[in-house]
Image (spheres, rainbow, N blue to C red):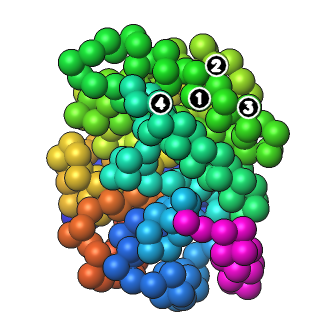
Amino acid sequence: MKELCFKGVNHVKTLTRAQIACSNYHYIKYSLPYFLQSMSNLNQHLIEFYAACPHLSIEDATYSDVAKLKHELDAREISVCCLTQEQCVYPINIACEDEVIRERSVQTFFKTIEFAAQLQAPYAQIVCGRGYFDQSEEAAWERSVQSLRRIVDKATRYGVTMVIEAASYNTTNVVYNTGRIRRMLDEINSPNLKSMLDTCAVAMAEEDFRTDLAILNEDMVHLHFADGTPLGHLIPGEGNLPLKDYLLALDDFGYTGAIPFEIYNRLYDFDPEETMKKCLDYLYQVIPA
């Protein structure tokens, strides 16, 4: 792992280690108890929880399952900053032309919201779906808006805030850059719909991180932190993204939200705790306290 170098630059002034959040993305070949024990081993008390098989399949889980998870989290004094359901690999698509798939997707997000409230997670993450690339992009946008209005209405009633993540254009033709996040936020216009940035997605869209922060302003409440080339979701230091600059931008912005690691790469599946430790060590170089 490359060392993070701050030559001629002081440590961050406003970011704190309390904002650093671990995650279970790269623990999916290990059991849920293993992940929870790993968080205790690493003395971590804030996580983004990736809701996917085998740890928590939203479509299959029951309220009892989530109650048991909450009990285990509480026993370890772990809080969930965001509940992020799998919606790229699974057939979840709120902008789909097929009404059955679209409705099932909305209903799945309804369950995610209920589970987020049960876990006392303030945020649940969402991407805005995609349409067929040989059909109207604006029609896909309108389907996404219709679905998202319903989802946000449900979130409002449950005291949960949805956070939009832009996926790369390789994945979606609805919300694939920060300008389109801004457009969606303005169109829905709800205090229970906010935004996030993903360091890999920012680089993939060839955007300037500081400009993105200015575009989103107070609506920027969450983050996915990883390295890449520009994609890859690698351990910080193993790609070529300007992570130092991103952190300094967040610091200058006065960002107070969580900084979760999204290490979503099968390279790291077989030694997840050591991977998580390397991620923490990397940020500890930058955030001294």
**Residue that mark 1 sits on:** 148
Indicate the position of residue 197 as horizontal and vertical percent values: 46, 38
Q: Amino acid at mark 2?
A: Ile
Q: Nearer the viewer, residue 15 or 265?
A: 265
Labelled pair 4, 1 in contact (Cβ < 8 Å): no
Q: Is residue 31 above or below residue 249?
A: below
Indicate the position of residue 141 as horizontal and vertical percent values: 44, 18
Q: Secondary structure at mark 3?
A: helix
- Tell whether position 29 is magenta: no
Q: Main secondary structure of the magenta part?
A: helix
Nearest to the eye among marks 3 and 2: give it. 3
Q: How far apart are the alpha carbons under marks 4 and 3?
A: 20 Å
Q: Amino acid at mark 3?
A: Asp
Which numbered disc covers residue 153? 3
- Tell whether position 63 is magenta: yes
Magenta stretch, residue numbers: 60-78
Q: How far apart are the alpha carbons under marks 3 and 1?
A: 8 Å
